[in-house]
Amino acid sequence: MKLFLDTADINEIAELNETGLVDGITTNPSLIAKSGRNILETIKKICEIVSGPVSAEVTATDYAGMIKEGKRLAEIASNVTVKIPLTKDGLKACSALSKSKISVNVTLCFSTAQALLAAKAGASFISPFIGRLDDIGSNGMNLISEIVEVYSNYSFSTEILVASVRGVQHVVDAALLGADVATVPPNIMLKMYKHPLTDKGLEDFLTDWKSTGQSIL
Ligand code: E4P
């Protein structure tokens, strides 16, 4: 399973990229606004740090505008994936950009029917937002399960990118279902390392080791 970071914070990206575990980045207009930086400069800088796919979202809502913005974003670097909302115009733009070999991540997916259309439109990634479904009392993980089944039935190559992740358990559940990617905020990636028994076990080993008076080097 690939792990993407869901942030436009260049410092956090640079730091976590050092772990060697970051396979890509997702951004959206809210994350760009939060960064306080220019979108084109920010995406360029992120693409210099991370070699995997970097999603940059269009803000036009009409077909022609999405194509223009998508092409501009794709020019920034070869690893840019153009993020397009799941609307009628959006999927039309997804088809056209994908045909011209531009990678597209279709975002704001909340149903299996939408995910089916995105795959047929040639999307490289589909982003179902599980946390936002959970927020309204629905079950986001059921959506992932259905998309995994439908994509497998027809061998679609569109990768399932689990988005709107709210905690470590979401990542584990997505992995159990065989999702291709989870995009996680940096704080959730850091939480994935943690287990209280790891901390306690290490503390005990080091206490016992100290009592031996030995040193490895
Ligand atoms: C990523 O592609 C999405 O834009 C992001 O995961 C949305 O997360 P949120 O629901 O926490 O804003």
Image: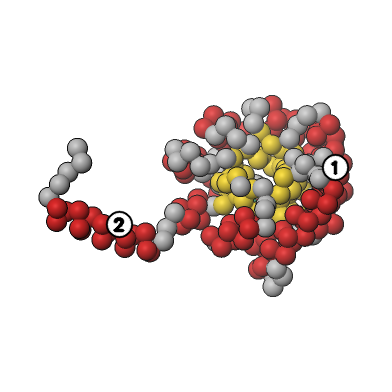
Disc 2 to disc 1, C-alpha distance: 50 Å
Residue reaching furthest to the left: 213
Image quarter in which the C terminus is found: top left
Residue occupying the point 62% across, 61% down: 173
- Whether the residue carrying mark 2 lies under 8 Å from ligand 1 is answered with no
Q: Which residue lies under the disc numbered 2?
A: 202
Q: Amino acid at mark 2?
A: Leu
Q: Characterize the local packing of mark 1: few (<14), some (14-19) or many (20 or more) Cα atoms within 10 angstroms.
A: many
Res. 75 in view: yes
In this picture, residue 94 sits left or right of residue 55: right
In this picture, residue 50 sits left or right of residue 105: left
Closer mark to the observer between disc 2 and disc 1? 2
Q: Which residue lies under the disc numbered 1?
A: 121
Q: Against 211, is 154 above or below?
A: above
In this picture, residue 162 sits left or right of residue 209: right
| Residue 145, image x, y percentages | 73, 60
Residue occupying the point 17% across, 43% down: 215
Closer to the N terminus: mark 2 or mark 1?
1
